[in-house]
Image (cartoon, helix red, strand yellow):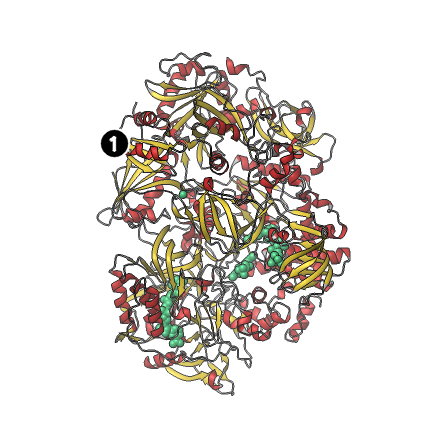
Amino acid sequence: MTGFRLSSGGLIDRSTTLNFKFDGKSFNGHQGDNLASALIANGVNLMGRSFKYHRPRGVISAGASEPNALVELREGGRKEANTRATMVELYEGLVAKSQNRWPSLNFDIGAVNSLASSIFVAGFYYKTFMWPKSFWEKIYEPLIRKAAGLGTASREADPDLYEKSYAHCDLLVVGSGPAGLMAALTAARSGARVILADEGSRLGGSLLFENEEIAGQSGFEWSQAVIAELASMPNVTLMPRTTIFGWFDGNIFGALERVNDHVAVPAPFEPRQRYWRIQAKRAVLAAGAEERPLVFGGNDVPGVMVASAMRHYANRYAAAAGKSVTIFTNNDSALRTAADLKAHGVHVEAIIDTRKGRKICNVIGKRGVKFVDLENGDIIPCEAVAMSGGWSPIVNLMCQRGAKPIWNESIAAFTPPDVGAEFKAIGSAAGHMLLSECLADGARAGTVKGKTPATPKCRDEAFAITPFWWVKESTGKAFIDYQNDATAKDLPLAAREGYGHVELAKRYTTTGMATDQGKLGNVNAIAILAEASGKTIAEMGTTTFRPFYTPVSFGAFAGPFTGHHFQPVRKTPLHDWATEQGAVFVETGLWMRSSWFPREGEDWLASASREVKATREGVGLCDVSTLGKIDIQGKDAGAFLDRLYCNTFSTLSIGKARYGLMLREDGIVFDDGTTSRLAEDHYLMTTTTANAARVMSHIEFCHQALWPELDVQYVSVTEQWAQMAIAGPKSRATLQKIVDGLTLNDETAPYLAAKDITVLGGITARLFRISFSGEHAYELAVPADYGNAVARAIMQAGHEFGIVPYGVEALSIMRIEKGHVAGGELNGTTTAADLGLGKMMSSKKDYIGRMMATREGLIDPQRQCVVGIKPVDRAMKIRSGGHLLKQGDAPSMAADQGYICSVAFSPMLNMWLGLALLSNGRARHGEIVKVFDGLRGHHYLAEICDPVHFDPENRRLHV
Amino acid sequence: MLIPCPHCGNRPVEEFTFLGDASVERPQSNDPASMPQWQAYVYERENPRGNFAEYAQHSGGCRAWLVVNRNTDTHQVTGAVLASAFKRKAKS
Amino acid sequence: MKYSVFSLLKNALSGHKNWTPAWRSPEPKPAYDIIIVGGGGHGLATAYYLAKEHGLKNIAVVEKNYIGSGNVGRNTTIIRSNYQLPGNNPFYEWSMKLWEGLEQDFNFNAMVSQRGVLNLCHTDAQRDAFARRGNAMQLDGVDAELLDREAVREMYPFFDYDNARFPIKGGLLQRRGGTVRHDAVAWGYARGADLRGVDIIQGCDVTGIKTENGKVVGIETSRGFIGCKKLGLCAAGHSSEVAAMAGLKLPIESHVLQAFVSEGLKPFIDGVVTFGAGHFYVSQSDKGGLVFGGDIDGYNSYARRGNLPMVEHVVEAGVAMIPAVSRVRVLRSWGGVMDMSMDGSPIIDKTSVDGLYLNAGWCYGGFKATPASGWCYAHLIAKDEPHKVATAYRMDRFKTGRMLDEKGQGATPNLH
Amino acid sequence: MSRTSVLQNVAIQGRFGADKGVPGVVLSVLHPMSIVMVIARKGKAKALSEALATLKKVDVQWAGADQFYVQGEGLEDGALYSDLKKRLAGIASVSDQSHGRVVIRVAGSKARGLLDKGTPVDLHASEFPVGKSALTQMAHVSVHLTRTGADEFTLSVFRGFSESFWEWLTSQAAEFGYQVT
Ligand SMILES: Cc1cc2nc3c(=O)[nH]c(=O)nc-3n(C[C@H](O)[C@H](O)[C@H](O)COP(=O)(O)OP(=O)(O)OC[C@H]3O[C@@H](n4cnc5c(N)ncnc54)[C@H](O)[C@@H]3O)c2cc1C
Ligand SMILES: NC(=O)c1ccc[n+]([C@@H]2O[C@H](COP(=O)([O-])OP(=O)(O)OC[C@H]3O[C@@H](n4cnc5c(N)ncnc54)[C@H](O)[C@@H]3O)[C@@H](O)[C@H]2O)c1
Ligand SMILES: Cc1cc2nc3c(=O)[nH]c(=O)nc-3n(C[C@H](O)[C@H](O)[C@H](O)COP(=O)(O)O)c2cc1C
Ligand SMILES: [Zn+2]
């Protein structure tokens, strides 16, 4: 317990009290606090445990880079693991728990790992756990996996809402410090569309906590005045609490807005977070710079912080890390901390400056700083240590598309690469350490046209640094990657073992792979690795920068497309009618199709069987609206279809329909369907439900890319028409009752007729005499808005004939009875011949797939082709997916003869039967094969037969 | 990644469907002797690291098939024309 | 030095100062009998087996970057042998067998972890396809189980079963499937090969292939000309590029596939699970990160990074499958460049150029193949005839029409 | 027999979502609509646009290369289609889409904010003036979008998706407060 609340100052509202819980204990803080500052103010400096050694850890930074102070925030479905206490705004009722400790944060069994730390060095696990072999699966790995991770994820669904949105601007400004504000202001004043985003809870950047002087005001006052002006402009969008997490091709930026993370529960209708995709004509990176820790023994003891963080807590949150502080630095900036702390009445014990040959060797203390010992043996008692190893421009975003940052000796840091005019770094992100430079930089970057306006006068703090990387005298552990417990010693070890490439060292030691992605530690690691490998830092270079600058919740990327709204639902025009009829619906792609229409006490099989019987014996009505319908018009429509289909359509007479088969250019069957000719220059194509979109795109390609000279136009009319199949011996009699002024017979509506008619006193309709069921059948299409009404009318008309609605289950039973191929057989690997449709392939014309279909492998007589199959034991049930073997053969893939594609229980033949693909099958009708269905532990004999199980003479088509 | 559709202007990549190498040309002949050309047309692809002319359909927009010029290494898009107007470089 | 608990303890006492490099960094010799282009999993495994199984000596692996910098070092580490076409499974099952003894074989713990691979299905058609596949696996002697919805719920109670847009109907489970520590595979093979005298040459970019009257004689590289009698291309993702150096045009497009890792979590998902109603598959690494991926971005690319739309597409599917993942955070995303072949299957074959061999076209599935690919490629290079479990991977299949198209998508690489 | 809107039981009239005074958006389903897709025959693009320019009492909206939606409210069902089929014979292919598409009007001060949640198209007036149409995707659904006023747009989607699309649209409008007329 060393931290405390300063008696005055800070951007907190002391008139408010916010109660919160950490590890079950109650505390309070003020509006304006974040969780870390409130804990410090309450004297809590132990906030978490590290990954490998379970070391006690406190907060080390004051922002997004925090590796230590990670908590489980909130509870139940709202629980968030690994949440950085430094980024959590305090709210009334906040509940947080520390992580990766058992049983408690103070006493953590896992800490024994650090005793064995001399063995648990980088990569130790690659060298052991191999004997005895069986132990890995049974003992070692389960142990390792149990140790995995830091926080625990909720198992409940997230009750909050998420949103996605797009934004566009002339200038995106990333970061709202002096550089960003100046850039935004300059651009905005010249009328540009500006977006200013900052991950912080409040705009202002470092001006919210640094003692600066701009235009005779404090830096804070100046910033608030600028922000107020920006807020008043219609062409400016201010986005606080918004992290730009990634830079993508086309100057598109990904951003996460934490809309309601600062409250216990989002307001009604409001999202928790909003994910933005920002298309920026230009963008500037005004992300500032990150202060680096120094590498020395015990640099992870709670109470050790980077110097700017310590003054950040003191100045902005009035939270002091301790009553007495030792400062350890290799550059000037830490002097600001000394000055600011003194001003707050915090005692600064000493400033240990490596440039004067002074070093802290070790920080002594377990759960808090007791004292530090120096290179000369001196000991300084103190409660906290502020360290500064220099400043690294926050180049991350600029390097996410492959460009590498450039080492700059004078500020001992990597500075951004030049990635072109679309995206420029300014201010400290560009390596400028002086406020005046940052402001000037911003003004320059914000200048859209004309000359750059003058920038306000300001006070500059001198900055100078002499790099210093590692106190080798340290006896205690000196950490590089705090969260993953990578120490300074691990890097030379990696180099020694051949993992000296910066990327290999990263992977071998896991440096930079934790939730903070090495924001604090990577440069230290690179410097030490470079030294160990006898290279310069510039030669060593950095590891690859990747999205995301800070981690992004799954929920934000998913937005509103969760649960039932994952994908849109597509309903047919007959959906209401089907619902009235008690349909059970099934997902078919995005469509919901009526699957069967159960009556009291029927399961799907009983229902489907009844539907089939009733249809084959009387009449049935089925919704087939999902079939793709493409209107194809133009002078060359016929010629075009001849090239798309393997059979011919230019010869089709007007008012007629024809079954068509389409191949892919590689000679394999693509799709099928009936296409009708409505006029000389007008065809209507139908496609399978599954391939409708692909066929459309194929048509567009063939015309636009292959044969643009053809005069042909096409558009999908799938949704314009409600289409129903009316099938069964009584279909004609039923339809007759609703068609206007036309007697249906084999002259007016012969088999394969396609004609425009009207029904129910004037409703436009198209009548096709086609049949998938094998019955005397029609398909009737009416404009979608009339669909339900017409279907109801047909049900009435058919009532006297016992009409039933039937679903896709019954449809599929009937097509299998008839041996009509569908999805199970059109599987993207079958040829026309395999499907028994080889005769359709014209030899008189060129068409898609003609040539490649002639390859030996596609005409090999041993290919698997469609056959019928039925169990020898006629009472037995068969299932799809069973493989076929010659009776004598032992089970093996080498002996595999094919498999069962589709099965159905045929109510007409009162048995299970199916369609299969069988090697050289057409020659094997009558053969008895062995069916291997090991998955269901079911092996049985089956008889191969003609695919047409029912009404082989097709008599019923014409009854 | 933004693609300049001649009809719709700059649109993001998710509105497009890609079909790869646009240098392939469908043979005219159905003579068995032309099999090698068919073979190449259907299976062999230019696949350069660098500038690339590729088929892409604005499937989430105007549905036009385009030939897009894009650098496969940098993803820099340098232009797009309608596939119907695309002039293939004569093969050397 | 041999890796073991004892060597570890011994070195601990001397402060780990005495470890020797896992592999040397030799200067390239003027010439080798065999050069393998590509220090990825397959290239290193090939060199390892050439030395170990065929007793060949004078071998080099040349890698333009650092070893494992390619897909072996950036993949989602899933191993399985659940294919359905004859010609595939014997090969992948052989690979699985090699995984099962790999660590003892090359004395490096690659953390082969057979926690099961579960593919979910959401429609009857998918279930039928799984039944066909599972039975094919069993015919090949591979373990396969068809699970119903309740059995899946048993294993993963917090998936979305009830509110889902596409309800889970069941799944196909291969218990012997699982994951392997990706980098360790490259390092283990590299160390094993190095111990057997193979020169592993990093930072050596192959820029040209030199042939004399139809025969390979060597390669031009960023480190000068290196002669060889046999040249094995193993440059996954860049196969078209290197093959073009010998005037070959391949049935391959290079595509980028993204992968992702979440922040580290306490044990959440035990095995590997793939969603059947969207592009999402996930497993949890030994460090606790959810390692996941989905579909390729869809356009030809040599940039090892993708774009936002695919990130959304994949994560939407993830949350649809596991609503509880909503508040977990995605930590990092990256991309890898893969050969997408015209039928979705690989090529292990000789080429029209004498002494030039090709190992390519692994799409997003070649990590699991690493041991068998190395084994069979080594066999081909050493004996000049295909290994019996890799005969289906000949390139002439496109000419004959005997494609190996598991998905039935045809000659459209980005649909495989 | 009269046409029934697919959204008749979905787009219930009333005031929904957050109550922040004036509703941020006002949504209305335009039904019954006559919608006809016309596509120029080869080489007839110019002839088509001239012919379309002479049309009265209907709006013509760009819908792709030499393609347009000709739309009118309150016309007799099928009349516009047969009329255009006659007028444009030989210069355009004509297909009736009146029942195939559902048109929703989105108006109000937050109309653009709402649509920004769905489309990557920049709807800022400087880029997307009144009268301009775009074909795009919103919430995984293809949308034909037209600006009909400073704060007013129409969205046209495939009928089958309209209910699902409506759910998305209203859920996204909720934070602004919306009125269905
Ligand atoms: C994101 C992602 C996820 C994946 N997930 C899985 C999975 O879960 N399961 C699975 O089985 N497979 C998966 N894969 C596929 C698998 O990673 C690859 O098929 C496999 O790694 C390829 O073999 P490789 O290891 O030899 O390739 P690589 O590791 O890419 O090796 C090729 C090497 O060749 C080098 N090279 C290229 N050109 C040259 C040159 N001119 N000179 C010198 N060297 C050169 C490259 O630098 C590279 O190191 C995934 C792939 C990706 C990208
Ligand atoms: N004295 C020193 O040693 C020293 C060192 C460095 C900086 N400085 C001072 O700090 C100031 C730097 O000004 P500045 O404007 O360049 O930076 P800044 O630090 O003032 O502001 C940067 C802002 O960008 C935000 N940010 C970073 N990444 C972001 C992202 N991806 N998305 C959204 N927001 C993000 C940060 O939260 C921060 O608020 C100057 O006054 C400079 O003198 C001083
Ligand atoms: C299985 C697997 C797990 C990974 N886990 C992590 C991780 O925990 N933390 C991390 O920063 N990166 C992780 N990565 C990503 C790597 O850091 C790196 O991005 C990836 O290997 C690609 O390399 P590159 O980004 O250097 O191009 C993981 C990668 C893989 C393949
Ligand atoms: Zn377009």
Q: Residues within 10 Å of mark 1 (few under 14, many from 20)?
A: few
- With respect to residue A215, does A818 lie above or below? above
Q: State which chain disc 1 sits on.
A: D
**Residue beneath disc 1:** D56
- Horizontal side of residue D42 vs C137, given as left or right: left
- Horizontal side of residue A601 vs C7, given as left or right: left
Q: Quadrant of residue A789?
A: top left
Q: Position of residue A598 (x, y in %)?
A: 45, 27
For the question of whether residue A844 can be seen, the reply is yes
* Ligand number 3: quarter of image: bottom right
- With respect to residue D55, does A530 lie above or below? below
Front residue of D130 and B52: B52
Q: In the rendered picture of this protein, how many numbered marks are placed on residues?
A: 1
Q: Position of residue A124 (x, y in %)?
A: 62, 66
- Horizontal side of residue A437 vs A328, given as left or right: left
Q: Quadrant of residue C397?
A: top right
Where disc 1 sits, the SS reads loop
Front residue of B46 and A828: B46
What residue sits 34% from the left and 28% below the top?
D88
Q: Position of residue D85 (x, y in %)?
A: 34, 26
Q: Position of residue A694 (x, y in %)?
A: 49, 36
Front residue of A1 and B18: B18
- Is the shortest distance between ligand 4 and the CB of mark 1 under 8 Å? no
What residue sits 38% from the left and 70% below the top?
A427
Q: Quadrant of the N terminus of chain C?
A: bottom right
Q: Residue furthest left?
A: D21
- With respect to residue C408, does A236 lie above or below? below
Task: Give, as a three-letter code, the residue at label 1.
Answer: Lys
Front residue of A129 and A175: A175
Q: Quadrant of the C terminus of chain C?
A: top right
For the question of whether residue C78 can be seen, the reply is no
